[in-house]
């Protein structure tokens, strides 16, 4: 049995009932066969066995009291996956679907993504099954304070630096940071995505969406196409989706549909960004509300049918496994020529196969959405220097990082004989740096 297959079997046996984690590991390991063949030292040093087992997993009770005085209990997670090239870094997700499998798949992906940015950050992820939707600010604050009371024992500016993800935006980061500071009596860059008044970086809010479009623009232009005049469908209407919309529009594309977990809106003239920002960012309401002042905008119940819409470019920016094989086939049939993963693992393995077999230009998440964590690392640098860069400076660094990631992934694909396959290219390029660091540091 091959080394890779042996490790995959162990991962499945050791982690039963963790389908998302298996999926993420399988996607990576299956592309690493040629690297392992070329570098026997990785198998000798047990790199794959060690990389697929988190260095540390923390699970904890998060008790809090709601506005009616009722005691609520949620579960908190932090998976510190790999610190070979830097302190653990990765977001916190607050969503009812969060469980160990989800946090582990995200943490595992984060190792290679962070490596691809070229910055010194290891991989980690965390969160809770708490749902901030429908909660008052006071409830969210009490939850965050309870969550941080436990998490603060395990994180620090040089140890583990969490950030936002689904359900964790600037409001939650503010409450978490305030509680950490109070508990530790220490003002440090322990979280990223902070407000600009207290150590945040310009462009962090926009970074994942902008970075996704910078990456896809590089890929699309290298293949003789352009965002200009393209019809673009973006799923989700959160942080990543909103700023992807903004950059697509700047580059001359038209975003014709967006969604939330209830349904999607379609507007052939282009979904109005300002309305989306007001409804989703400010008022925290449902996307349905976006039709109220806009006659050409139609609302459809159910979010998965968004992929039936005919488009040139699709940017899934909501959640994992939102594009399955059937949805992928529909996109191909309707003439979609590029797909960029803004969300983490939004396409199933079968869907990715459909895209690659049909010559769709495909930007995999760990490369295409790395702009968020890259800018988080820039926030860490600014915090360490006690200095802040201008918007233009950070934006330029972000753009250069995304272009570099594209070049690294496409060169690795060429080197390993799968030119144009950025899934394999990104996995290999991200893996080698971490694997070399692990070999150099001995069996730890
Ligand atoms: P937000 O919470 O800001 O927005 C998430 C959006 O996706 C919302 O519109 C939400 O709808 C929708 N959504 C969430 N869960 C589901 C679901 N199960 N089915 C359908 N729609 C859903 O999160 P982000 O924009 O920050 O994150 C989106 C994705 O991007 C995630 O996969 C995240 O891991 C990834 N990502 C985020 C980064 C960041 O910097 N924020 C960095 C890299 C990746 P509703 O409003 O109804 O909940």
Image (cartoon, rainbow, N blue to C red):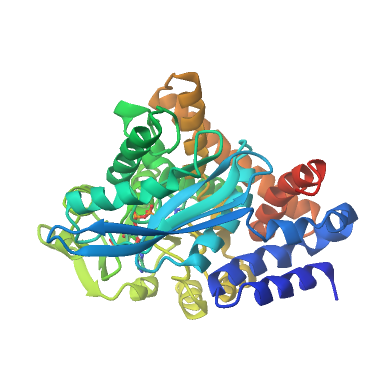
Q: Residue at x 79, y 72 (%)?
A: 6
The reply, left or right, for residue 227 in relation to residue 72 is: right
The reply, left or right, for residue 414 in relation to residue 214 is: right
Residue 35 placement (x, y as % from top left): 81, 57
Can residue 267 be seen here? The reply is no
Residue 138 placement (x, y as % from top left): 18, 49
Give the image quarter of residue 357.
bottom right
Give the image quarter of residue 408.
top right
Give the image quarter of residue 25.
bottom right
Asked if residue 161 is positioned above or below residue 143 in the image, the reply reads above
The one of 314 and 402 positioned closer to us in this rendering = 402
Residue 126 placement (x, y as % from top left): 47, 54
**Residue farthest to the left?**
293
Quarter that holds the N terminus? bottom right
Q: Residue at x 32, y 72 (%)?
A: 303
Q: Residue at x 61, y 66 (%)?
A: 359
The reply, left or right, for residue 30 in relation to residue 44 is: left
The one of 310 and 442 positioned closer to us in this rendering = 442
Asked if residue 45 is positioned above or below residue 178 in the image, the reply reads below
* Ligand 1 falls in quadrant: bottom left
Q: Residue at x 30, y 39 (%)?
A: 174
Residue 144 placement (x, y as % from top left): 31, 49
**Residue farthest to the bottom?**
326
């Amino acid at each position: 049995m091959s080394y890779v297959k042996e490790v995959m079997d162990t991962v499945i046996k050791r982690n039963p009932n963790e389908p998302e984690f298996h999926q993420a590991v399988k996607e990576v390991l299956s592309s690493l066969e040629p690297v392992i063949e070329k570098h026997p030292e990785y198998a000798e040093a047990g790199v794959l066995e060690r990389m697929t087992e988190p260095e540390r997993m923390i699970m904890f009770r998060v008790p809090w009291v709601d506005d009616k005085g009722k005691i609520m209990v949620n579960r908190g997670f932090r998976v510190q996956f790999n610190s070979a090239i830097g302190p653990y870094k990765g977001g916190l997700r607050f969503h009812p679907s969060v469980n160990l499998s989800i946090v582990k798949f995200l943490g595992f992906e984060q190792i290679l993504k962070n490596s691809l940015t070229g910055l010194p950050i290891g991989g980690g992820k965390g969160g809770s099954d708490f749902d901030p939707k429908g909660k008052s600010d006071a409830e969210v604050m009490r939850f965050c304070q309870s969550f941080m009371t436990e998490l603060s024992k395990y994180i620090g500016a040089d140890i583990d630096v969490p950030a936002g993800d689904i359900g964790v935006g600037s409001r939650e980061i503010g409450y978490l940071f305030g509680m950490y500071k109070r508990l530790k009596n220490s003002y440090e860059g322990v979280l990223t995505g902070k407000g600009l008044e207290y150590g945040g970086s310009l462009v962090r809010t926009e970074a994942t969406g902008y970075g996704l479009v910078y990456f896809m623009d590089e890929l699309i232009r290298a293949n003789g196409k352009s965002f200009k005049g393209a019809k673009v469908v973006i799923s989700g209407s959160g942080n990543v989706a909103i700023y992807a919309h903004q950059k697509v529009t700047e580059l001359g594309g038209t975003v014709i549909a967006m969604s939330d977990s209830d349904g999607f809106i379609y507007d052939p003239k282009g979904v109005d960004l300002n309305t989306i920002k007001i409804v989703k960012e400010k008022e925290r309401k449902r996307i349905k509300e976006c039709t109220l002042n806009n006659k050409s905008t139609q609302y459809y119940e159910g979010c998965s049918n968004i992929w039936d819409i005919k488009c040139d470019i699709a940017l899934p920016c909501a959640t994992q496994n939102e594009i399955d094989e059937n949805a992928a086939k529909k996109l191909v049939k309707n003439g979609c020529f590029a797909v960029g993963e803004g969300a983490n693992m939004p396409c199933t393995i079968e869907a990715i196969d459909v895209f690659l077999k049909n010559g769709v230009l495909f930007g995999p998440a760990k490369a295409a959405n790395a702009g968020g964590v890259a800018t988080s690392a820039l926030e860490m640098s600014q915090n360490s220097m006690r200095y802040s860069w201008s918007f233009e400076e950070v934006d330029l660094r972000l753009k250069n990082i995304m272009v570099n990631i594209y070049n690294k992934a496409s060169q690795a694909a060429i080197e390993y004989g799968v030119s144009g396959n950025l899934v394999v290219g990104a996995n290999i390029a991200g893996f080698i740096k971490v694997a070399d660091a692990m070999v150099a540091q001995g069996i730890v």
